[in-house]
């Protein structure tokens, strides 16, 4: 059986599944329940100056009858007294010494505050730190959270303060509320950060109540932008992760992947794009901690099937497969094929192609079930029909290369090959 | 053995005649089902519906919580969409053609979703259609059944003033008088009629029978156009000895009595034979059983492959405990002291296909005898041939002959529904009413 244990800069955990710094990691009672359920580690909810939260903190986006496709919150960092948090951290570490105990930090913006907080947390038994440079609401107005992460110079300065004092690994958590995560990531690594994690939540409005006209979440007739997360943000997180995995400076440090991880498949994808561990929040908040069981079993079974003995056998394997558009092979061509035995005659491929794509599907109108076939000479291989088809493997894309040799856009232009094939 | 009423307790009557297809209990349940719909293009369900309801559109509207829009979509195609959601044989129409069937998955519960929107519309009295200003044109309709009401609503929307003449004391036609009570209640039928006429411009004159209280000529003189939608009604006779014995009843009358009186007052036998295997036969058999008959046996001269009812309906009868004898044709009803005691049947076998394309039953020579005290005849309904002939309407064995779907040989007189087609589903009659209205509007312009 595959070994899914993880070594993150010497911080060991029995699996790569950590709970992200968030409400599920705010208290001993939650964290103990998480560890009993089997989670590999936690990032304790951000510690810092004493704050006060509002009531009504979360809202979500449902889609097609499915709840919590996207989720947002306007919670601040931990609102519990620091000494209680520290005492509980010590207790939990004693109870579960084999699990990763990372503590998220967000001190006031001065060196002294950071140093004090670091010392207290190390004394409490933290195994690593995660610097919260990403919180998009509440703390930014006070010059913390995303306000730090959005300015590489400030981020670097704070990382340097931290590194002066910290004796345990330091992970810098990046905000996605920037045009690129790379500048701040580089600044953090140059400032000495031992690792990176991403993404924090994305600024958002999940919706507007059509009766009260107040956006969500509702707080006494008003709302604020909240941090968006959950399955909806996964593609954005994977893209940002890839930019970090591909950058020569930031690729030097390990990464903890965050953003919509809900299943072992999501985790495997984050790891293939460079994450050593993954952090989960929304999926646990939707279903409870029990989801970790299938995450472990699923990942382990997949690794067995693929012949990977340990996670490092596949971490980062997909990074080089994301290239520049201009390096893609222009001679590659594939064409949709509809399996007539599997087709249920719903017409979704037809109407999608006809209205919004390349008019490449024939319709044979019959009562009551029409037949649909691909006009091979018209099909550009865009994949849309396959994506909308409700039946697995009913529409497949068959390779029909234009020519056997690889040629990219740059060479195509150089050779003066025809651009317009319409 | 005896035919008697009041066989079961009040609670049993209530349970036995409760709604057979209960509605969604919550909006969440409806949304869950609505979200299963794939929203097919050129949807087979819509093509399978005689009134062409845009099914995926109304289901999508339930999913987006636009219930009013959903009801409007349904009623735009079928003003009796609420009733049809309860009585349509959906397993051979919309649900039968749902693409999920190809995946061996349960089809979308289209009828149940349709009921969700339309019942809400009726309960909330949503006025989803606006009647155009009156044109001053007046149309008479004979029969307040599905065809007549559908025609009336379409005409009224266009500003025509409509008067419906109905021989019964309530509207709805067979929906009110001829369908199993566990599918639609009299209260529902009344609400549906009131909802349809609430658009305005429609007057229903009850207890007005063609040939007795009104005449075709009279209507022709008084109105700009006339629409005949008086349906069918006479039960086909078995034409066998003993048919007039006490205890031989026709299914239409049996169901009519059941729909117009208290259930406990309806008498059934201990051992009941029902002749036929159409929807009416099933409705009669299941209801006889539910009224407390000990044994109910459906007797049909062909096999399951040729039966007119759907498999779904057959299963209702089977689950109710009705016995079924295939390839059996009544030969003679025997009795004592004027009362039915036995039914003698010919054992049949299938021969060559007949005009309907189904293999015709032929006598094998063997017979058998059932001990029965009641025989319900449900071997089909006959058109009002005498009425049609006496009014000089061209017809085909009593079914009014029409050109271009609705025009009769009489000037300004149109016809549709069961009186033309000999008896089909409610949903077919609704479509006939729409077609009739379209032709009448053209004629009036």
Image: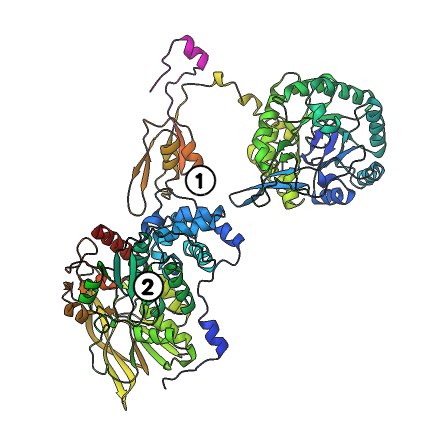
Tell me the subunit letter for badge 2: B
What is the number of the mark on residue B421?
none
Q: Residue at x 37, y 48 (%)?
A: B54
Mark 1, Cα crowd under 10 Å, few <14 / some 14-19 / many 20+, is few
- 2 and 1 marks on the same chain: no
Tell me the subunit letter for badge 1: A
Q: Is residue B32 magenta?
A: no
Instruction: Name the spot of residue B278 as percent of width and height, x first.
Output: 30, 66
Name the residue tied to disc 2: B203
Eye-nearest disc, 2 or 1: 2
Instruction: Name the spot of residue B104 as percent of width and height, x first.
Output: 41, 50
Mark 1, secondary structure of its residue? loop
Name the residue tied to disc 1: A392
Mark 2, secondary structure of its residue? strand
Is A136 or B375 nearer to us in this picture?
A136
Which range is magenta? A399-422
For residue B323, say whether it is visible.
Answer: no
Q: Residue at x 81, y 23 (%)?
A: A110
Tell me if A293 is positioned left or right of A139 in this view.
left
Instruction: Name the spot of residue B172 as percent of width and height, x first.
Output: 34, 65
Labels 2 and 1 touching (C-beta < 8 A): no
Q: Residue at x 36, y 58 (%)?
A: B200
Q: Is residue A402 magenta?
A: yes
Is B220 or A3 nearer to us in this picture?
B220
């Amino acid at each position: 059986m595959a070994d899914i244990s993880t070594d993150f800069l010497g911080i060991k955990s029995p699996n790569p599944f950590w709970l992200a710094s968030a409400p599920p990691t705010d208290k001993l009672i939650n964290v103990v329940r998480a560890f009993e359920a089997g989670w590999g580690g936690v990032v304790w909810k951000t510690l810092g100056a004493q704050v006060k939260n509002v009531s009504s903190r979360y809202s979500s986006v449902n889609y097609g009858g499915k709840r919590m496709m996207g989720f947002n919150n306007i919670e601040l960092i931990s609102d519990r007294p620091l000494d209680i948090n520290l005492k509980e951290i010590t207790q939990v570490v004693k109870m579960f010494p084999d699990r990763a105990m990372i503590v998220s930090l967000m001190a006031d913006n001065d060196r002294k505050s950071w140093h004090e907080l670091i010392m207290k947390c190390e004394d409490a038994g933290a195994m690593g730190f995660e610097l919260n440079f990403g919180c998009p609401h509440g703390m930014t107005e006070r010059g913390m959270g995303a306000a730090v992460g959005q300015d590489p110079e400030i981020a670097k300065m704070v990382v340097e303060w931290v590194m002066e004092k910290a004796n345990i690994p330091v992970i810098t958590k990046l905000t996605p509320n920037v045009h690129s995560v790379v500048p701040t990531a580089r600044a953090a690594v140059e400032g000495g950060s031992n690792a990176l994690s991403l993404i924090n939540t994305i600024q958002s409005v999940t919706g507007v109540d059509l009766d009260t006209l107040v956006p969500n979440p509702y707080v006494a007739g008003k709302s604020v932008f909240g941090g968006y997360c959950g399955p909806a943000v996964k593609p954005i997180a994977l893209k940002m992760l890839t930019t970090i995995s591909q950058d020569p400076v930031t690729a030097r440090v390990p990464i903890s992947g965050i953003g919509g991880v809900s299943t072992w498949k999501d985790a495997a994808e984050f790891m293939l794009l460079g994450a050593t561990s993954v952090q989960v929040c929304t999926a646990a908040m939707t279903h409870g901690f029990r989801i970790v069981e299938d995450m472990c079993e699923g990942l382990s079974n997949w690794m067995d099937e693929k012949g990977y003995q340990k996670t490092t056998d596949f971490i980062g394997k997909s990074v080089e497969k994301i290239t520049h558009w201009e390096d893609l092979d222009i001679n590659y061509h594939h064409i949709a094929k509809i399996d007539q035995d599997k087709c249920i005659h719903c017409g979704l491929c037809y109407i999608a192609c006809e209205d919004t794509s390349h008019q490449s599907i024939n319709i044979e109108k019959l009562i009551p079930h029409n037949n649909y076939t691909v006009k091979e000479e018209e099909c550009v291989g865009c994949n849309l029909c396959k994506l909308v088809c409700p039946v697995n493997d009913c529409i497949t894309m068959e390779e029909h290369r234009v020519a056997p040799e690889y040629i990219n856009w740059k060479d195509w232009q150089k050779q003066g090959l025809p651009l317009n094939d319409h | 053995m005896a035919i008697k009423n009041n066989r079961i307790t009040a609670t049993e009557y209530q349970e036995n005649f409760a709604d057979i297809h209960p509605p969604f209990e919550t909006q969440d349940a409806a949304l869950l089902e609505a979200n299963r719909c794939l929203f097919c293009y050129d949807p087979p369900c819509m093509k399978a519906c005689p009134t062409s309801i845009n099914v995926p559109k109304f289901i999508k509207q339930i999913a987006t919580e636009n219930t009013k829009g959903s009801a409007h979509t349904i009623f735009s195609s079928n003003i009796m969409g609420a009733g049809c959601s309860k009585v349509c044989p959906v397993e051979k129409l919309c649900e039968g053609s749902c693409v999920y069937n190809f995946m061996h998955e349960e089809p979308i519960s289209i009828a149940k979703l349709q009921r969700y929107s339309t019942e809400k519309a009726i309960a909330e009295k949503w006025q989803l259609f606006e009647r155009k200003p009156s044109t001053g044109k007046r149309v008479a309709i004979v029969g307040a059944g599905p065809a007549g009401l559908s025609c009336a609503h379409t005409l009224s929307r266009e500003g025509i003033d409509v008067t419906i003449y109905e021989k019964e004391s309530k509207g709805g036609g067979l929906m009110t008088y001829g369908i199993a009570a566990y599918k639609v209640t009299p209260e529902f039928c009344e609400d549906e009629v009131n909802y349809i006429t609430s658009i305005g411009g429609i007057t229903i004159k009850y207890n007005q029978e063609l040939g007795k209280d009104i005449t075709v000529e009279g209507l022709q003189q008084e109105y700009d156009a006339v629409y005949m939608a008086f349906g069918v009604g006479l039960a086909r006779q078995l034409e066998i000895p003993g048919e007039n014995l006490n205890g031989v009843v026709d299914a239409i009358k049996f169901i009519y009595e059941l729909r117009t009186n208290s259930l406990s007052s309806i008498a059934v036998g201990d051992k009941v034979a029902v002749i036929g295997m159409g929807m009416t036969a099933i409705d009669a058999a299941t209801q006889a059983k539910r009224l407390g008959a000990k044994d109910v046996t459906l007797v049909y001269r062909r096999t399951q492959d040729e039966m007119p009812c759907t498999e779904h309906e057959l299963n209702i009868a089977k689950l109710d405990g009705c016995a079924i004898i295939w390839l059996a044709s009544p030969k003679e009803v025997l009795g004592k002291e004027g009362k039915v005691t036995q039914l003698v049947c010919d054992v049949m076998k299938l021969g060559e296909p007949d005009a309907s394309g189904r293999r015709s039953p032929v006598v094998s020579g063997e017979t058998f005898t059932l001990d029965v005290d009641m025989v319900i005849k449900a071997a089909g309904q006959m058109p009002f041939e005498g009425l049609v002939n006496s009014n000089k309407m061209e017809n085909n064995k009593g079914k009014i002959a029409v050109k271009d779907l609705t025009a009769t040989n009489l000037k300004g007189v149109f016809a549709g529904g069961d009186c033309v087609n000999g008896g089909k589903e409610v949903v077919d009659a609704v479509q006939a009413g729409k077609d009739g209205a379209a032709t009448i509007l053209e004629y009036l312009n």
